Amino acid sequence: MTATETSHRPRLIRLEAVKARTCLSRSTIYAYMREGRFPAPVAITERCVAWIEAEIDAWIAERIATARRS
């Protein structure tokens, strides 16, 4: 496997990493998800979810772009 192949593979991150990257609390993340304003997680097991890192990165980039336009 080449470095390019490994860099394009989807990566999953858990809630604590999502909170750290977005500076949002757990309750805000779940509220935004209910409102359709935040990416939904992927079920890993019955009791474990994770988010796709690229989707979180895109969400952050969108927030930055929106703030810069205002």
Image (cartoon, rainbow, N blue to C red):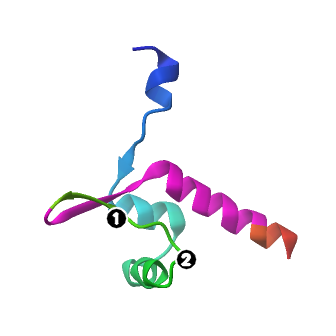
Disc 2 target residue: 37
CA separation in Å, label 1 and label 2? 16 Å
In the rendered image, residue 52, in percent from the top left (x then y), is placed at 42, 52
- Numbered circles on residues, count: 2
Confirm or deny contact between disc 1 and disc 2 (CB under 8 A).
Answer: no
Residue in the image at 51% along x and 78% along y: 36
Q: What range is drawn magenta here?
A: 46-65
Secondary structure predominantly adopted by residues drawn in magenta: helix
Residue in the image at 47% along x and 22% along y: 5
In magenta segment, residue 33: no
Q: Quadrant of the N terminus?
A: top left
Which residue is more in the foreground, 53 or 25?
Answer: 53
In the rendered image, residue 58, in percent from the top left (x then y), is placed at 60, 56
Residue 5 lies, with reference to residue 19, above or below; the image says above
Residue in the image at 13% along x and 64% along y: 46
Q: Residues within 10 Å of mark 1 (few under 14, many from 20)?
A: some
Residue in the image at 39% along x and 84% along y: 27
* Amino acid of disc 2: Arg
In the rendered image, residue 43, in percent from the top left (x then y), is placed at 25, 60
Disc 1 target residue: 15
* Amino acid of disc 1: Leu
Which residue is more in the foreground, 43 or 29?
Answer: 43
